[in-house]
Amino acid sequence: MLPSPNRRRLSALLAGMFAVVCSVASAAQTDYLPPWNPPPAGGVSFAVPPFDAIADLHGDIVDPQLTVFFAGNQFMVVHDLVEAFKQRYPQYQRIYVETLPPGILAKQIETGSLVMGNLRIALKPDIFTNGKGSIADLQKQHGWFADTADYARNPLAIMVAKGNPKHIEGLKDLGRGDVRVSMPNPQWEGIAKQIEASYRKAGGDALDHTIMDSKVKDGSTYLTRIHHRESPLRVLQGESDAAPVWSTEAYFQQEILHRPVETVAIPADQNVTATYTAARMKDAPHAQAAKDFLAFMTSSEAQAIYRKYGFQPPQP
């Protein structure tokens, strides 16, 4: 046995090493937390993830010259896209963008406002983007839109941790009892319908029922509230083993941020490709800005930005 002073020194050394390890681990985990976009320039920067970090509200909320409600999974494009638009149209410098789930954005339009924590936002959008089918459905229900334009496409993929420790080879493996799945909630996320269609292509109604019913009940399928933030984070933090996502979300984490994740491709005969549509609101508060932004979305500049982040062009 070591003499008492030596034991104390050894204990202090081990405690110090443990504190350093915990600090490094905590820092590494914090690095994964949103927001994942560059913050706006100027002003006092105050963000304390996960307590005070507004990841899906972008830009100028006071007297904006253009307000855009984006399909949430395009959050990674917003910074570059808005900066390019400002350069092309310098008369618009105060721009506000939301990248929340499209189901939430639609309800925000219906009710006239969004309440997030202690903040109430009553801005009307000039542009709303969503999947092509969802835009058509909303137009049929509400007649909100004056004009539309398709601007990008996106297939599905499966995101897993680096090294693929659960050996996920395809959608059928998500039905295994030992695989924890992070799955978009059909109540809020349009992507859920496409993923369920892929489940049925891969394993019939039985696979869809297993993942979306049985595994939800036993806790091995987690239903998200905002999948484009939660699903990658759950995989990165070891809380989920696999997450079906749009391919660009896996691409962003793996190729742009260089995070320790991998992509498992879904075969074409089991996959679903979404087409994204931008819609100009009939009652857009900034009518000319809305027309200019809609035209910009199909420009070569905007298309190059979407390609940078892994999106496919609007036409095959």
Image (tube, rainbow, N blue to C red):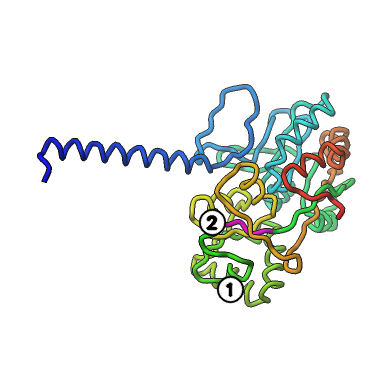
Which disc is residue 123 wearing?
A: none
Q: Is residue 155 left or right of residue 279?
A: left
Q: Is residue 83 left or right of residue 7?
A: right
Query: At which x and y percent is residue 198?
Result: 70, 67
Residue 184 in view (yes/no): no
Residue 206 in view (yes/no): yes
In the image, residue 164 sits, relative to residue 50, either above or below, namely below
The residues colored magenta run 157-161
Which disc is residue 210 wearing?
A: 1
Query: At which x and y percent is residue 18?
Result: 32, 41
Query: At which x and y percent is residue 169?
Result: 61, 66
Q: Toward the viewer: 299 or 253?
A: 253
The local crowd at label 2, few if under 14, some if 14 to 19, many if 20 or more residues have their Cα within 10 Å, is few
State which mark lies toward you, 2 or 1.
Answer: 2
In three-dimensional space, the C-alpha distance between marks 2 and 1, rounded to whole angstroms, equals 26 Å
What secondary structure characterizes most of the magenta part? strand
Residue 74 on the magenta segment: no
Q: Toward the viewer: 240 or 190?
A: 240
Residue 160 on the magenta segment: yes
The local crowd at label 1, few if under 14, some if 14 to 19, many if 20 or more residues have their Cα within 10 Å, is some
